[in-house]
Amino acid sequence: MKFWQNRQMVYSVISGLIVCLTVWNCGSSDTKTTSDSGNSTSKTSAASPMAPAKKQIVLFYGNSLTAGYGVEPSQAFPALVGKKIDSLGLNYTVVNAGLSGETTAGGKSRISWVMRQPVAVFVLELGGNDGLRGLPLTATRQNLQAIMDTVRKKSPEATIVLAGMQIPPNMGTTYTKEFRGLFNELAVKNKAVLIPFLLEGVGGIPKLNQPDGIHPTPDGHKLVANTVWKVLKPVLEKE
């Protein structure tokens, strides 16, 4: 019994040495020395290219417009904005957190989960479904404020970009006017960057919208991407 215990102990020691040597070799492959150099470690470090900086996140948070309802994900405006970012070599990556059918109440309920990692720029596109359903604007305003409060808490340094929306006058002049104005109001209050109207040049134009008259076609998304880019590009370059 003692023989086998001693034998097992030897195997354990040998195994431990093999693991240590393996880890050491894997972890120090960039700092090997050669016999003809007294300080090859520093030379190797100097010659090695610097690791690229981790890309910062631009998070698009919205409803079916952001999600790209009815079009391919690559055709939705967030993806198109991502291509513009890449073309300029800016150190950002786009994350699309759009969800079809989302209201501001739904957005409020899931924002903490979405904001599990810090973001550099937060593009908020919600409220359209509230307006189309005639939901109380007091609640819409409070929900949007709560979402921005959570973003500030989770990513204090993030720039918030708020996408303004407009709705047809079906709900009456007073409601329509107040709905349009609440986005500017919230942008000023929260020192957010405002996109005056996300669907500028697209909303209400049949050829740029799908048969439902609400969701843009691929060509419509291209125009939306341009509208967003006009506001977002200076933000990213400043960041």
Image (cartoon, helix red, strand yellow):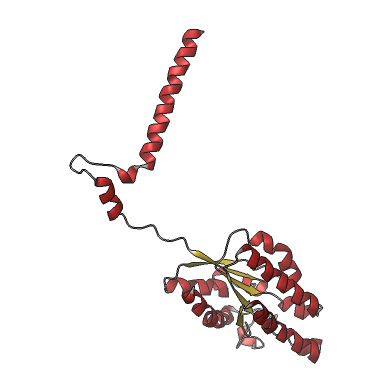
194 relative to 105, above or below: below
Image spot of residue 166 (x, y percent):
70, 85
In this view, the residue farthest toward the bottom is 173
Identify the residue shown where x is 65% and y is 77%: 190
Question: In the rendering, at what x and y percent does residue 43 appear?
Answer: 25, 51
Residue at left 58%, top 62%?
A: 118
Above or below — where is 84 with respect to 115? below
Of residue 12 and residue 99, the one placed in the foreground of this image is 12
**Residue drawn 64% across and 67% down?**
151
Residue in view at x 53 percent, y 78 percent: 232
Above or below: residue 149 compared with residue 217? above
Query: On screen, 107 above or below 10?
Result: below
Residue 72 seen: no
Residue 218 picture location, percent across and down = 57, 78
| Residue extending furthest toward the left | 36
Q: Give the image location of residue 6, x and y in percent.
A: 46, 13
Q: Quadrant of residue 46?
A: bottom left
The image quadrant of residue 26 is top left
Please indicate whether residue 60 sits to the left or right of residue 141 in the image: left
Q: Is residue 56 left or right of residue 212?
A: left
Tag count: 0
For residue 36, say whether it is visible: yes
